[in-house]
Every structure is written in C-alpha cells, then in structure tokens.
Amino acid sequence: MSKKNLFGLTLAELEEEFAPLPKFRAKQIAAHIYKRGVKNFDDMNDLPKNLRAEFSTRYEIKIADVLKRLDSRDGLTKKFLLSLSDGAAVEIVLMKHDYGNSVCISSQVGCQMGCKFCASTLKGLERNLTAAEMLGEIFFAEEFLRAQGRKLDSVVIMGTGEPLMNYDALIKMLRLLHEDYCLDMSYRKITISTCGVVPAIKKLRDEKIPVTLSISLHAPDDKLRSALMPINSAFGLKSLLAAGDDYAQVTGRRVTYEYILLGGINDTEEHARQLAKILGGQLANVNLIPFNPVVERTFSPPTNAAVKKFFHFLNSHGIGATVRKEMGADVNAACGQLRAKL
Ligand code: SF4
C-alpha cells in the first residue's frame, strides 16, 4: 500500500487525518514538518513510540528530489531541476540579492499561454502543480539555505506556468505559507506574476492576501501586445490596466508592470511615450527586462543605448522604472528562459 504524503496538509487537514487522536498531535506533527523540516517519524521525539511506528507504516513526508543543479559563474544564482512524484520536473531559481535571498518557483508543468518570447510554453501545458508541490519548491529552497546558515526572505511565483490559471491550488499554498505553524511568511514578501488573466486578478483582489502583483505588459498597445501575448485577444489592455489599478487601490500594494525590451520590436522612444501615457496616474512602477535569448525564439536583445533611453524617458515622465539586474542568464535561469530541462 502506498503511503500518504503529509507534506502540504493544513493543520485542519492533519487534525482530520489523525482523528480521533487529540488535536494537539496534529499541532506537534505540523511543527515537525514545517518548522523543523523533519522527514522521519522516528525523529519526532515528543510522540509516543507506538504512534511513531504506526505513522511510519501509513505516512511519509516528502518534498521534491533534485535531478540537477546549475550555478551561475558569479555564484549569485542557482537553478535546480526538481522531480515530482509522477516523474514530471520543474525548475526553481534561487537568487542572492543585496536585500536577501529569494526563490522563483513554478506553478505549472509547462504553460498554455503561448507568449512568443518565452521558453516555458514551447511544449504547452502538461499539468497544474498541487499546493503541496508549490510549497515543496519553497521548502526545498528554504532548507537548502538553512543548511548554509542563510534564510529565505522572499518568494516570487514567476517561473514556469501562469499562476492565476492554477488559482485554487495557488491560494491554498499562499495561505498555508503565511500560517504561523508553517513558514509564517508575510504576504508582502510574496510576488505573483501574471500575463493578465483579468477575471482572476479581480478575484485575487478580494482574497485579503495583499501579495505584490506583477503584470507582464510587454507592449503599450493592443495590436503589438496581441502579437506577442495571445491572452491579450481575450483581455485587452484597457480591462487589464483597469484591473491592475483596482488591485492597487483595494490592496494598497503598488503593482509592478514587467516590460521585456525586445530589440527593434517594442523598445523605441515612441513605445516609451505610449507606455508612460497608459500608466499615468496609476500606483505602479515598471520593471524593464532586456530580453534574454531563447534558442527557439528569433527576438534579439535591445541595445544598451535603447535600454537607457527607455528607462530615462519613463522616469522623466513620472513613471518609476527600474532595469532588472540580469541574473543567471549563463545557466538559462533568467526571465523567459525556464523549461523543465537543464
Ligand atoms: S511568460 Fe509566463 S504566462 Fe507567458 S508563456 Fe511564459 S510562463 Fe506562460
């Protein structure tokens, strides 16, 4: 008989699982799993021996196994390929910034959204990740850092997949991550990236979990955006910007608009002018991402001069903009380069 995996269960689910045992047993086990990283029931010293033996035959505590690891030359970025219980694999990227350590996790195996500059969508969507699998990606990073005397400071859900297309599992995972018996992570340290699933942005606005929302914009007009991102044909710029503005107003959280600069496609001063116009008055900032090459894609990176000009135009026209520091491009761990293969 296969053992049931307890990792990823909430306290209420553990209580239900262990009924009619007293509820404090579930609390003890949750602390072992989430606070101490215990994987073996024999190490749960505060449980009676007979219970440890019984649980060992019925349950397991398992997160992902590492299939492969790549380290960037500067040592700041590490990419891991993790295997899931059904043999599927996902990538996570661990980054060391001046302000702490962050992990970028995946929300799906593959992606169906078809953005034209992205490697993650080349083979379409294989499946959604479960809440436990997403939490497992984060715990893997947390345990890796803890073993080195470091800690995980923030989580970015910006790897493979569109998180808002895996909505229920995403919300369950976020709530669990925030619980004090789990990692007790502040919602303010979590960023969700979306390509613009407008109805789900509206739903997220009302969840009372004030995570940072990062919207992949990449073009300042509908024609270009629809050519780069098929989602735009379903939810055009007007409705997307209104949903972003609304999210910022309701949650009080500044929305980040991601803008990949593709050489000769969306990186001229005219594009910057249009972008400043459509974002004017929003509680928002823009993160410019010079394109990272993907073998199967024909786009080119922008010139340094074009990046500088775009950046200065936005900042001098009232739109706070930053240029994303490129991390991990030498191990294909940069934005748009993730796939389930190292
Ligand atoms: S950019 Fe995000 S939403 Fe678009 S195809 Fe890639 S993983 Fe999917």
Image (cartoon, helix red, strand yellow):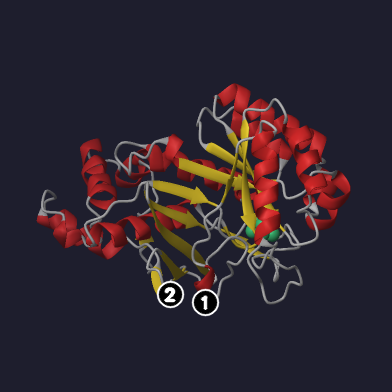
Which residue is under mark 2? 70
Q: Quadrant of ligand 1?
A: bottom right
> Does residue 60 appear in this view?
no
**Label 1: few (<14), some (14–19) or many (≥20) C-alpha neighbours in 10 Å:** some
In the rendered image, which quarter is residue 160 located in?
bottom right
Q: Position of residue 43 (x, y in %)?
A: 15, 59
Amino acid carrying mark 1 in the image = Leu
**Residue ID at (39%, 36%):** 186
**Residue ID at (50%, 31%):** 209
Ligand 1 lies under 8 Å from the Cβ of mark 1 = no
**Residue ID at (36%, 60%):** 140
Looking at the rendered image, the quarter that the N terminus falls into is: bottom left
**Residue situated in front as seen by the camera: 93 or 11:** 93
Q: Position of residue 63 (x, y in %)?
A: 37, 62
Query: Closer to the N terminus: mark 2 or mark 1?
Result: 2
Amino acid carrying mark 2 in the image = Leu
Element under disc 2: strand
Label 2–label 1 contact, CB within 8 A = yes
Which residue is under mark 1? 342
**Residue situated in front as seen by the camera: 216 or 324:** 324
Does residue 46 lie above or below 285 as drawn?
below
Does residue 115 lie above or below 25 as drawn?
below
